[in-house]
Image (cartoon, rainbow, N blue to C red):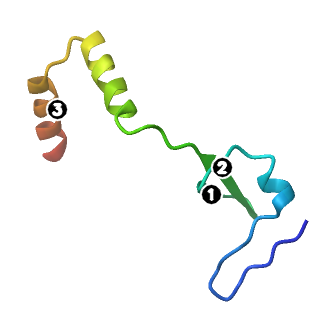
Amino acid sequence: MLAKKTVKNQITLPKAIVDKLPQTDYFEVSIRGEEIVLRPVVKRRVGVRVESVRSKMKALDLTEKDVTAAIRWARTR
C-alpha cells in the first residue's frame, strides 16, 4: 500500500492498516534503518499510572521523604 506525504508532512494511514490496529489516536514514531516505525500508544485512565507508582512505593517501603531526597539528589547531578 502507498501513502503520500503532503506538503505539511502529513500522511493518511490506509483504512486496511488502521482497521488492524487497536483504537488509538497517538503513535510512537521512530526510525529503524530507512523505515519509519509507528507503534500505537494506548492511553490509560487518569490516575492509573499514579496508583501504580504508589503501589510500588508501598511495596518498597518508600516514603515521600525518600522520594523528595532522591529528587533533590538527582537535580544536583
Is residue 75 shown above or below 65? below
Q: Quadrant of residue 32?
A: bottom right
Q: Is 43 left or right of 9, judged from the image as shown?
A: left
Residue 62, given in percent of the width and then of the height, sits at: 19, 17
User: In the rendered structure, which disc, 2 or 1, sits on the residue that comes first in sequence?
Assistant: 1
Q: Is 56 left or right of 35, judged from the image as shown?
A: left
Callout 3 crowding tier (Cα within 10 Å): few <14, some 14–19, many ≥20:
few
State the count of labels.
3
Cα–Cα span, label 2 and label 1: 9 Å
Amino acid type shown at disc 1: Ser
Amino acid type shown at disc 3: Ala
Residue at 73%, 59% in the rendered image: 33
Q: Nearer the viewer, mark 2 or mark 1?
A: 2
Which residue bears the numbered disc 1? 30
Which residue bears the numbered disc 3? 70
Q: Quadrant of residue 72?
A: top left
Element type at marker 3?
Answer: helix
Q: Nearer the viewer, residue 27 or 47?
A: 47
Residue at 66%, 47% in the rendered image: 23
Q: Nearer the viewer, mark 3 or mark 2?
A: 2
Element type at marker 2?
Answer: strand
Callout 1 crowding tier (Cα within 10 Å): few <14, some 14–19, many ≥20:
few
Which residue bears the numbered disc 2? 39
Cα–Cα span, label 3 and label 2: 32 Å
Residue at 64%, 48% in the rendered image: 40
Residue 51, given in percent of the width and then of the height, sits at: 33, 26
Q: Quadrant of residue 56?
A: top left
User: In the rendered structure, which disc, 3 or 2, sits on the residue that comes first in sequence?
Assistant: 2
Amino acid type shown at disc 2: Arg
Q: Are marks 3 and 2 in contact (CB under 8 Å)?
A: no
Q: Is 73 left or right of 30, judged from the image as shown?
A: left
Q: Are marks 2 and 1 in contact (CB under 8 Å)?
A: yes
